[in-house]
Image: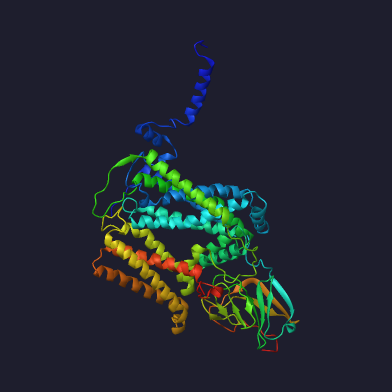
């Protein structure tokens, strides 16, 4: 192996080059931090207390405007909090009472009352928010983060105690 | 002070001196030598050489498209700066500014219309300019990189249009931008952070409006100004290609830029200014009701220049419709000039007489093929349904992409077998793809109704 000699001039130039690269990376980092989103998850308002589960008739879909979700009471007694944002390109998905489906106006995706995809282009079921029913029988929906599902599953359906 | 100098002479000397310090040459040059000197010494005119080839300034060679882009850019800068003074970029005030602009401010509507229509026209003209350069092989060595800069400028023009689209803060703006930014979400790994950075949060909000305003009035215009200057400088350095007949000789006759080119440009600019002002006086830029984040209109369409992509999304998995297919297209566009080397065709329309025929045929094939594909996909083809055991990214992504690539390779090979040069076959393929994208855009604009169902505009 031949020994490469580095002249003093090359060494100093290399040093300046490295410092320049370091300055650029510093400024890039500061710039990215400067422009990073000022608002974050949970801005919809954290937890929503929707009162006693008994006031929601079976098979009903109740929009909760401030929380940007639908409270769905399934016919089998289970509850779901479905985020209203289409998983395709982010339009607001209204519930069509005639067909009992969520139908996206933008690109025609259709979802069942549980949020599963009936009709593409949506690539995955509608997202959910974490829903729980406390001891007093009140429904609490936590809107701080969404639950993404890649395939239909019943795991997230919440049943009031004694009714599952 | 000497008695010889009388007062009036002194005065006129002084004025002359001031004038000469600003404008060094006489504004009425006499003789070619002075005209050439005027071009050399002028900051603005210096984008031209002092003499140009007589054949390259023929209108039907360039159609003045680059110059028209420059004119539109100038109109947009002037009207844009005017609009800054009457517009407030906040969700509460933005829409109100639009109403005031339309109803109270003298000529407010005209200025807004002029800005809107010039911006939209710029996208069309930029694409036409790209086509003109491609079909006359204006990107051959040493101009390859200038083509890349042109592509960058086209993307920036679309970016400027898209960021401007949000500013009126009406339903059209809100949902087109929601749909448009969600497309980016599908880029693997970096998509979500980029979307959040752009939106300033998880969805279109006040932060998005601030971001888009900054991009629209400062960052994108500056970038366009910088790159366009470089682009024009390179055109000047590399010299514009001269049109040639396929078997004819190259004309080498040169004429002075003043008056031959400059007067043509002036008349052309004046005519377009008249067209734009007339158009803007009679046709209003669209404005719907104020943005309502809890109600998506039906159908919620993207801006018209994104209709082709929106149409792709209806047929392919989003990763393919939004990212892979457009990405491949962009990559192909960028490397095109580096491939075009088997024929010396710069300045010849459509490479050859034969090339011209194949271009027309390919355009029709692309149109018909795309229409048939859309109809088939609507009424019969259902890959995800036929291949239920595969995830949709394979059944509605890789499988149709492979099919389309095979068809394209087959078309290319067929043309080669029929005795066309690689250069002509590649041109045909480009035409086919462009016409396909063009058709997708037309279908998206005119053939999509409620729920994005296929409708016929005449029914």
Q: Quadrant of residue A58?
A: bottom right
Which quadrant of the figure contains the N terminus of chain A? Answer: bottom left
Say if residue B14 shows up in the picture.
yes
Q: Is residue B248 left or right of residue B338?
A: left
Residue A133 x %, y %: 70, 81
Which quadrant of the figure contains the C terminus of chain A? Answer: bottom right
Figure label count: 0
Q: Which of B340 and B32 is in front in this view?
A: B32
Going 23% across and 54% down the picture, which residue do you hit?
Answer: B247
Q: Nearer the viewer, residue B353 or B145?
A: B353
Going 53% across and 20% down the picture, which residue do you hit?
Answer: B11
Going 61% across and 53% down the picture, which residue do you hit?
Answer: B109
Q: In this view, does A132 lie to the left or right of A1?
A: right
Residue B111 x %, y %: 58, 50
Residue A21 x %, y %: 46, 50
Q: In this view, does B200 lie to the left or right of B274?
A: right
Residue B440 x %, y %: 45, 69
Visual colour scheme: rainbow
Note whether B81 is above or below B123 in the view shown: above
Q: In this view, does B27 lie to the left or right of B429?
A: right
Say if residue A87 shows up in the picture.
no
């Amino acid at each position: 192996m031949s020994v490469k000699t580095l002249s003093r001039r090359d060494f100093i130039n290399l040093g300046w080059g490295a410092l320049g690269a370091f300055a650029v990376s510093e400024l890039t980092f500061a710039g990215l931090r400067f422009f990073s989103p000022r608002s974050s998850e949970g801005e919809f308002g954290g937890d929503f207390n929707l009162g006693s589960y008994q006031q929601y008739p079976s098979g009903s879909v109740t929009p909760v405007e401030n929380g940007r979700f639908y409270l769905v009471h399934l016919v089998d007694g289970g509850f779901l909090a479905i985020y209203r944002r289409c998983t395709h390109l982010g339009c607001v998905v209204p519930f069509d009472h005639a067909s009992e489906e969520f139908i996206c106006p933008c690109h025609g995706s259709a979802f069942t009352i549980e949020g599963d995809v009936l009709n593409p282009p949506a690539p995955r079921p509608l997202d959910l928010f974490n829903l729980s029913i406390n001891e007093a029988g009140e429904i609490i929906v936590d809107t701080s983060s969404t639950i993404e599902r890649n395939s239909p599953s019943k795991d997230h359906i919440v049943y009031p105690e004694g009714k599952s | 002070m000497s008695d010889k100098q009388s007062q009036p002479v002194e005065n006129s000397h002084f004025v002359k001196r001031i004038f000469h310090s600003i404008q060094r040459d006489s504004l009425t040059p006499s003789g070619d030598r002075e005209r050439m000197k005027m071009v050399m010494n002028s900051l603005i005119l210096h984008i031209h050489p002092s003499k140009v080839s007589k054949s390259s300034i023929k209108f039907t060679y360039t159609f003045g498209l680059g110059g028209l882009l420059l004119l539109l850019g100038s109109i947009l800068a002037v009207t844009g700066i005017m609009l800054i003074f009457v517009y407030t970029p906040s969700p509460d005030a933005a829409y109100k500014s639009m109403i005031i602009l339309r109803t109270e401010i003298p000529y407010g509507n005209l200025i807004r219309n002029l800005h809107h229509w010039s911006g939209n026209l710029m996208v069309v003209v930029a694409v036409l300019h790209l086509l003109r350069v491609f079909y006359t092989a204006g990107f051959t060595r040493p101009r390859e990189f200038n083509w890349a800069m042109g592509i960058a400028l086209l993307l920036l023009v679309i970016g400027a249009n898209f960021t401007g689209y949000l500013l009126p803060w009406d339903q059209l703006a809100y949902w087109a931008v929601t749909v448009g930014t969600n497309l980016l979400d599908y880029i693997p790994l970096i998509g979500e952070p980029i979307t959040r950075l752009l939106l300033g949060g998880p969805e279109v909000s006040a932060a998005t409006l601030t971001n888009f305003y900054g991009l629209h009035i400062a960052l994108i215009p500056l970038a366009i100004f910088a790159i366009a200057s470089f682009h024009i400088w390179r055109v000047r350095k590399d010299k514009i290609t001269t049109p040639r007949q396929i078997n004819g000789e190259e004309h080498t006759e040169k004429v002075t830029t003043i008056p031959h080119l400059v007067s043509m440009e002036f008349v052309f600019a004046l005519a377009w200014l008249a067209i734009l002002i007339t158009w803007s006086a009679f046709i209003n830029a669209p404005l719907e009701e104020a943005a309502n984040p809890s109600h998506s209109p039906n159908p919620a369409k993207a801006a018209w220049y994104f209709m082709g992509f929106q149409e792709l999304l209806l047929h392919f998995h989003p990763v393919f419709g939004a990212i892979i297919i457009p990405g491949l297209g962009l990559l192909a566009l960028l490397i095109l000039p580096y491939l075009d080397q088997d024929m010396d065709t710069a300045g010849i329309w459509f490479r050859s007489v034969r090339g011209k025929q194949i271009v027309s045929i390919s355009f029709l094939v692309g149109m018909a093929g795309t229409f048939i594909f859309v109809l088939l996909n609507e009424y019969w083809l259902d890959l995800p349904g036929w291949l239920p055991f595969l995830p949709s990214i394979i059944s509605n992504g890789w499988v149709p992409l492979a099919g389309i690539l095979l068809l394209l390779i087959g078309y290319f090979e067929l043309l080669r077998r029929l005795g066309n040069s690689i250069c002509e076959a590649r041109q045909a393929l480009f035409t086919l793809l462009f016409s396909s994208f063009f058709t997708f855009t037309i279908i998206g604009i005119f053939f999509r109704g409620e729920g994005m169902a296929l409708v016929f505009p005449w029914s």
